[in-house]
Amino acid sequence: MIDYLNILLYVQIALCVFCLFRIIRGPSIADRMVGIDIFGILVVGICAILSIITKRSYILDIGIAWIILSFIGTLTLAKYLSGKKLNE
Amino acid sequence: MMKYIAIFILSFIFWILLTFSFSISNIVVGIAAALVTSFVFGKYFLKHVRPFLQIQRYYWLIIYLFIFTWECIKANFDVAYRVLHPAMPIKPGIVKVKLGLKTNIAKTILANSITMTPGTISVDIVGDEIYVHWIYISTDNVEEYSQKIAGRFEKYIKKIFE
Amino acid sequence: MEIIGFIFICIGILFNLFGCIGLIRLPDVYNRLQSATKCVTLGTCSILIGVVFYYGFTNGGIKAIVAIPILFFAATVAAHALVKGAYIFGIKLGDKSVKDDYKDVHKS
């Protein structure tokens, strides 16, 4: 079973390449931000599968912290995009 | 005073769920962290405590969760169909939908629900109107698409959060 | 138990794949954000449910259950902020769009 999980982990990492393609190619700046947002969610899936393979449950803690940090980062980028000051 | 106690209990439950070990030292650290959290964030969080104590709200919440999960799964198959179809049957646009809800928290939850349901994503709330980006506009009739977008959730949310 | 968890993880990765294909194929920012947010969020939730089946009700399983509502609220609010920011920044809707009610509000 662990071998198949390894294959799934590689598939999930390969999906990140799609996001990187959108970040590099995106015609406007908003496209790049969409790519960054989706990339942050995909990393949580990588953390979850990795915690099963290595049988260490603290990797899920890293996933939860990653969700919150990626959320704050996306909000900051969106606020910059709409042209406001950060303390508004 | 009651709202400080409510946020203390909520954050302590959250700590127990995150660590999930019942040793003495863990519980003491949890109580200290929850005290700090409730002193710093207590005045921002909620205005009334009474809605937490009414039992029927939890009953409607459970029914709402089932309906919401079903809509989410339907949304995924809808998006997968539109993405994989070779001609991409999309007809996007931004429409305006009237709301019947009053409080802020109910409006926020409704906007989040709209974002996860098939083909719609909420853009902005102005007063009691919500602007929705829709991937496939099927009708031009205001009544009909209001019912289609928001009508499924509105009555449950009114019972839960107001 | 492990078989059920494995099936959930497979379904999750399939949905992630659909979301990423949508991110590449669809024509403008708003449609891309729609497909990507919905599919990727539910796919990751499905992966976390698979993790719950692997661990059972121990330390790790409870953590995975706690992560699901946090992921839901974070992803939806982030998508909402990105759509509004992109509209105010001045990115037009794509060529295929048929209606725009938000234009009047933003002008005033």
Image (spheres, coloured by chain):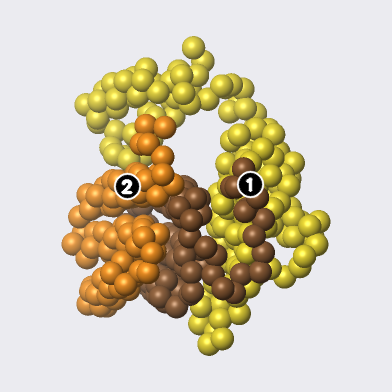
Chain colours: A orange, B yellow, C brown
- Relative to residue B116, is residue A14 depicted above or below? below
Left or right for C103, reference B9 = right
**Of the numbered discs in the image, which one, if any, rests on residue A73?**
2
Separation of disc 2 and disc 1 at Cα?
27 Å
- Relative to residue C16, is residue B38 depicted above or below? above
In x, y percent, where is residue A10? 24, 75
- Report the number of discs: 2
Looking at the picture, which amino acid does disc 1 mark? Answer: Val
Q: Chain of mark 1?
A: C
Q: Please say whether residue C5 is visible from this viewpoint.
A: no
Disc 2 packing (10 Å; few <14; some 14–19; many ≥20): some
Q: Which residue is mark 1?
A: C105
Q: What residue do we see at 56% from left, 21% from top?
A: B47
Q: Chain of mark 2?
A: A
In x, y percent, where is residue C65? 40, 50
Looking at the picture, which amino acid does disc 2 mark? Answer: Gly
In x, y percent, where is residue B152? 71, 54
**Of the numbered discs in the image, which one, if any, rests on residue C87?**
none
Left or right for B42, reference A72 = right
Q: What residue do we see at 21% from left, 59% from top?
A: A55
Question: Which of the image's four quarters has the N terminus of chain C?
Answer: bottom left
Q: Kindly indicate the quadrant of the structure image that contains residue B118.
A: bottom right
